[in-house]
Amino acid sequence: MTDLDAQARAILRGNDKGGYTLPTHGLYPYQWNWDSAFAAWGFATFDNSRAWDELDTLMASQWDTGMVPHIIFHQPDPGYFPGPDVWGTGQSPATSGISQPPVAATLARLIWDMDPQAGRDRIAVLYPKLVAWHRWWHEVRCTHGPVAIIHPWESGRDNCPDWDIGMAGVDGTRVGPYTRRDTGHVNPDMRPTKEDYDRYITMVEYGRSVDWDQDRIVADGPFLMADPGITFILLRAHDDLAAIGRALGHDVSEIEGWAGALRAALPALWNDKLGAYDAKDLRTDRFAGILGSGAFLAYLADAENPALDTQLMRVWNAVTYGIPSADPESVSFNPRKYWRGPTWPVVNALLALGFKGSGRTDLAERLRSETETLIRQHGFYEYFDPLDATPCGGADFSWTAAIWLTWARHHPDTALKGAA
Ligand code: DGY
């Protein structure tokens, strides 16, 4: 074990609140959905049982509808805004009212592969809950074909340029008074703007005003966009969930049906003019017209093609470290602003899983080695400037530590089956 391995484990242990893991202290003081699934994957490299505990805690806050919320507010923390009162979902423990990228089934499958015997009983308990969550995505968020999101935060790629067109339709000028907390924890230049926040909070206020009636929000809410990123993540996760179900001896035809329907909806996300998959404003039926990491997640779902390959190499070769979250040749590119350009180790790991799955081991290794360099040089930051490697956002980040342990470090001794 190297020093960095020890540091990565210490970060996961240090952010462990007993059954759930904070993304990082200060900036994100609760349990976040996809962060938690990645933390579980990281724990699985040295404490398999703790990995399953993380997923159990996440799924324990599933709503009756099947939705698994994006934040679970286990303990009050005045250092975060918007907290449980602003969301007002009435859940116990309190939660937000939207979901987040459903990576859990994909990562649960990898965790199970790492210790099949120890994992069998654990995954058998999780399986019906994952099925209910995937059913929710299919029935509530896939009514337009691809996955629709009702808030940019649902995508996990909060302020990426993909959402600009939909955000422009949200009137943030009548939001009530509020104080942001994120800009007190990290450099404000690396965070979303005030205009973005006014709109984010307006959308939360709308959701609360309709008691988080998801059908109504999809029909009438201020924001509804098709997200290539979650579409590809869900498609991959459907396949992984079906594989888990088969191994447990279940009939998985329902899951296969969801996957088939989602794959059939992919052409609706292809923007010929852009030469790539693209986000779409479902209120106006207009494409965003911007390339970003959401489109490249097509590799994760075996949905790539030669045109996308060309775009990938153009975007990737325009930077030095990792795949950027937005197109460096677009006017909105900002290499240090959250999802508007920085490279994210966690997305790089997903993309590499996709490259490996389609036999592109050269691309998977290039991405791993660039991500390794970033972490070796600067530590376990939330994201990095892809041009000069400047570390950005929060430090001692759980998912970056997890990605180090599972993938970015070179570790022939614990090479993970199925991982890149
Ligand atoms: C935040 O607070 O920035 C989160 O990304 C919302 O989920």
Image: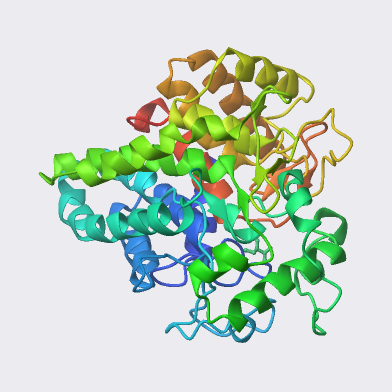
Q: Position of residue 130 (x, y in %)?
A: 31, 56
Identify which residue, 255 or 145, lies in the foreground.
Answer: 145
253 displayed left or right of 296: left
Nearer-the-camera pick, 342 or 164: 164
Residue 200 at x, y = what percent? 72, 67
Left or right position of 240 against 321: left
Q: Quadrant of residue 79?
A: bottom right
Percent across and percent down for residue 318 are: 79, 22
Q: Is residue 252 visible?
A: yes
Does residue 208 appear left or right of residue 118 in this picture?
right
Residue 183 x, y percent position in the rendering: 81, 67
Q: Give the position of the C terminus as an image quadrant.
A: top left
Question: In this view of the protein, can residue 110 be seen by the observer?
Answer: no
Residue shown at 78% from the left, 44% from the top? 340
**Position above or below: 257 against 120:** above
Please identify the quarter of the rendering in which residue 18 is found: bottom left
- Residue at the location (66% across, 57% down)? 152
Picture residue at 50% right of the left edge, 69% below the top: 214
In this picture, residue 76 sits left or right of residue 244: right
Q: Taking 65 as reference, is 321 above or below it?
A: above
